[in-house]
Image (cartoon, helix red, strand yellow):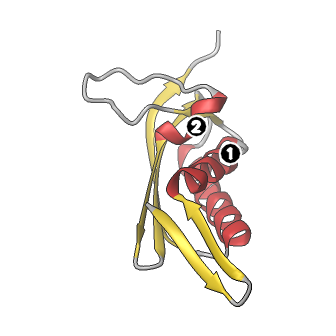
Amino acid sequence: MTRKLETEYGKITIPAEVIANMAGIAATQCYGVVGMASRNTTDGLVSLLKKDALNKGIKVVINGGQITIDLHIIVEYGANISVICENIVSNVRYSIESMTGFKVKEINVYVESIRVDE
């Protein structure tokens, strides 16, 4: 799925994968976020994704000019999860809207796991 914008200078096309990468970078820059988790958790196992696979933990739906983003994250132990999620929503919304000019309708954050460092 792509988002298209037409101006007097030409057409701009942004694929959903690019928006997912932008959202992943913005989310992982937030304090308390260890990384993105894989979306395929049917077997109950959650794996931490590497930096080059950020978009696999993110689902982007573009519908009628509005963007909905689902983020699956792993947080560090001891951090306030509600504050982390509010910070992620704010940071991702600002990043996507300022870089693309498109409106973000909804951002859903799913905390898949907590990482404990020893």
User: Dot 1: within a 10 Å radius of its alpha carbon, few (fewer than 14), some, or many (20 or more) residues?
Assistant: some
Left or right: residue 24 versus residue 71 is: right
Which kind of residue does numbered mark 2 sit on? Leu
Q: Residue at x 53, y 24 (%)?
A: 48
Kindly check if marks 2 and 1 are in contact, taking CB atoms under 8 A apart as contact. Answer: yes
Q: Which mark is residue 112?
A: none
Q: Position of residue 13 (x, y in %)?
A: 59, 67
Towards the viewer: 11 or 5: 11
Question: Where's the N terminus, which quadrant?
Answer: bottom left
Instruction: In the displayed orientation, state which residue is furthest to the bottom.
Output: 8
Label 1: which residue?
A: 25
Helix, strand or loop at disc 2? Answer: helix
Q: Residue at x 59, y 43 (%)?
A: 80
Instruction: In the displayed orientation, state which residue is furthest to the left.
Output: 42
Helix, strand or loop at disc 1? Answer: helix
Q: Position of residue 18 (x, y in %)?
A: 60, 53
Which kind of residue does numbered mark 1 sit on? Ile
Q: Residue at x 54, y 58 (%)?
A: 15
Q: Position of residue 117 (x, y in %)?
A: 64, 15
Q: Position of residue 87 (x, y in %)?
A: 65, 55
